[in-house]
Image (cartoon, helix red, strand yellow):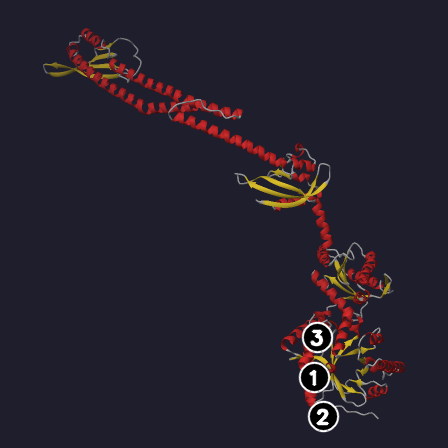
Amino acid sequence: MTRSVEGRFLSIVATTIFILVVPLFGLFLYLASESASRELQQNLDVLLAANAQALAKPLWDFDRESVEQISATIVSSDKVERVQVADASGGIQVSMPPQHKWPGGRIETLTRDIIYEALDGPKQVGKITIHYKPIDLLSSLRRSEAILTGIFAMAVIGLVAAAVIGNRLMVIKPLLRLTGAIEATRRLGSRHHVDWESNDEIGRLARSFNAMQSQLEKEERELKHAHRRATDIYNLTPAMLFSLDDEDQITGVSDYWLVATGYARSDVIGRRFSDLVPDESRSAYLDQKLARNTLGVVELTTRFVCADGEIMDILIAEAGKLEYTGKNGLSLSVMTDVTALKRSEERNLRQAITDHLTGLMNRQGFESALDTQIRTADASDGELACLFIDLDRFKWINDNLGHEIGDAVLCRFVEHLRPHLTPDMTAARLGGDEFAIILRTADRGAAEKAAVELGETICSFFVEPMSVRGATVRLSASIGIALYPEHATSAAELLQKSDMAMYRKKRDGKNGAQVYHPSFEDGTRERAAIEHDIELGLSNDWFDAYFQPIIQMKTGRIVGYEALLRLLHPERGVIPPGRLISIAEETGAIDRVGTRMLEKALENFVRLSEASGNSDTYLAINLSPLQFEPALPMKLTAMTNRYGIAPGRIVIEITEATLLHDNPQIRTILDSFNRHGYRIALDDFGTGYSSLSYLNRFPVDIVKIDQSFVRAMCDDETELNEKSRMLVEGITAISHKMACTVVAEGIETEEQWALLKSFGVDNGQGYLFARPQSVATLIAEQRAKPEPRQRSVA
């Protein structure tokens, strides 16, 4: 650096001299040379003119000796190198000095004609030629000029020397010291100062450098202290800290990391972190790293191999930073052992998708497994079968034997099922008594056969009664089967189609397996239309109560009416209850429909009573089991009070299905009806399991014989005919013994009427007397004929 600075300084000085001094000195020499050359030319011209005149006479006289003398005189001048004289006739040729070689250097000549002034005029008698050396730049200088030039040169040299010495002392020397301090700082690592004091720019530079060194030394001490503190914090933090470079190589680890993993620091520094990830998890880890290669804090989970070979699940929170180059630099990462948490999550996940009672999957787990099985089937071009299983009569077991027995029945069913489940099957309890099984086959067409066989096997579980905790229960299973992709294109659709097939099997008699068929969709559309009609009927007041008269068997006099639900559709006309009630019960609309039915029935009953003037008839109202709630008696009482109807004129008809649950709450509700003065009618009597016991256990006032017995009394088959008559006669006798009024349903012929009257049946209803009619029709008939049906039998 020193030579470079000094060399640049000398170059500047030399350039300055070359640009300023040398041109001036050259101009001086040039002017001096021109002056000397003119003076020499003038002297030579004078010399040549004078000697040419002097040589005229000798040449005219052919005086060779005189010519030589004059030539010798001319050549004796220090300015003349050679002289040549020749006469015009060529007789005299003189050349001085008489050497054979010319002097070295550049020679110039001057020639002049020699003219003799004869009497008859000027005559050229010859020529004289002088050879001389021209004056150059240096030879033209006179002594004084040479001395002046020497003084000028010495002054320039002194000036240059003074500048060089001053530069070396005032600039180069402090720069050398500054360079030495910088080099010592670089080599030794300590901050060196420049030993230089002056009040010029170099002094200010030295002071600034020393101040900078002091500041850097202070900051360096602070930085070392901060680094020491950061390192201590890094190592003492109770967390597994480590750092990676942009090539995933470990650049640093904390002491806690080493303790937790069992490695030595020298064993891991420089290694790729992915090398410490198990082979089976490495690709997933690298994929996560690649997918999350962004700035900021990113989190990923993977597995890690400790020094002792133990594998732990870890959560890595990595914070990256930018280098000045704009590329990803080092990162600080926190590694957390989440092995216990991972196992807890897996345990919680298993619990979340497992039915705690049976150990099978629950609905959530089944739906997830079904999605997975569908993807597997699509990838392998396989086929799936979904079996939807519903246990028949399970609700009766729960309600009558208790939930503990019901749970034991479910567990017993699963015990029977497990041995028949292969690795390609997934079973789940969807809720209550509903189960589902996924069955996967590699070949198309094999799934249906396997599903049907499995369904038959499941149904065989219930051939014999099941003994559970001292109770003997009899069950059956209704199973729906749907296939993927033949019947469905998604998991939800497959489950829906199998559910649809199961409900079709329930309607067709239960206890068996039913494969889905597209025709089942018709029933679904019909059901959706009925649900829509129910909601429209409630919104637009389409529901009405039709009345069917109940007549006294002996006299034919009307003693009451049964209120029957009808939906007056503006387009499809009058729609009978049919599936309206069952679908309303399933959708939860039965309470609103029942309330509307009660309002219409009581309103129509008041109109009919006022029109006929008969206040002795009663009104039989059918109630769904789902309407039986503690507030029902009070609701009915409020409604009858509002319409001014005496409780004794209202009969509550209940089916054996309502009493079948043997629910204490139903008994309480029936007792409340009885206390308020309402009468209870047991509808469809004789079709249940224990009809006679209900007469003793519940406050029944009226027994209605089911129409199936009435029709069978006149059947062509003698045995059935006789048994049916005996049953009707026996029911009538027992009911009368229990102080119950007997009503026969479905009377359609005179023969049936006569038989029933002979058995002592009190009242009856059927198409023989009247069909269900609107109140307006009945009022019109009442006005036209007070007793629309008066019959006598001989």
Q: Pick whichever, 364 or 378, lies toward us.
A: 364
**Separation of residues labelled 2 and 3 (CA atoms):** 37 Å
User: Marks 1 and 2: which is nearer the front?
Assistant: 1
Q: Residues within 10 Å of mark 3 (few under 14, many from 20)?
A: some
Q: Nearer the viewer, mark 2 or mark 3?
A: 3
- Residue 404 visible somewhere in the drawing: yes
User: Which element is circle 1 on?
Assistant: helix
- The mark that comes first in sequence, 1 or 2, is 1
Instruction: Name the residue that disc number 1 marks.
Output: 605
**How would you rate the neighbour count of disc 1 (Cα within 10 Å): few for under 14, some for 14-19, many for 20 or more?**
many
Three-letter amino acid code at disc 2?
Answer: Lys
Residue type at mark 3: give it.
Met
First in sequence: mark 2 vs mark 3 = 3
Sequence-first disc among 1 and 3: 1
Q: Position of residue 780 (x, y in %)?
A: 68, 89
Could you tell me which residue is drawn at 51 percent across and 31 percent down? 219
Which residue is the extreme one toward the front? 675
* Residue of label 3: 634
Q: Is residue 203 above or below residue 369?
A: above
Tag nearer the camera, 1 or 3: 3
Residue that lies at the very extreme toward the left in this rendered image: 119
Judging from the image, what secondary structure is the residue with disc 3 in?
helix
Question: Label 1 is placed on what type of residue?
Answer: Phe
Q: CA distance from mark 1 to mark 3?
A: 20 Å
Quadrant of the rendering where the C terminus is positioned = bottom right
Mark 1 to mark 2: distance in Å? Answer: 18 Å
Q: Are marks 1 and 3 in contact (CB under 8 Å)?
A: no
Pointer 2 residue: 785
Q: Quadrant of residue 416?
A: bottom right
Front-most of residues 423 and 627: 627
Could you say where residue 753 lies in the image, as x and y percent from the top left?
82, 87
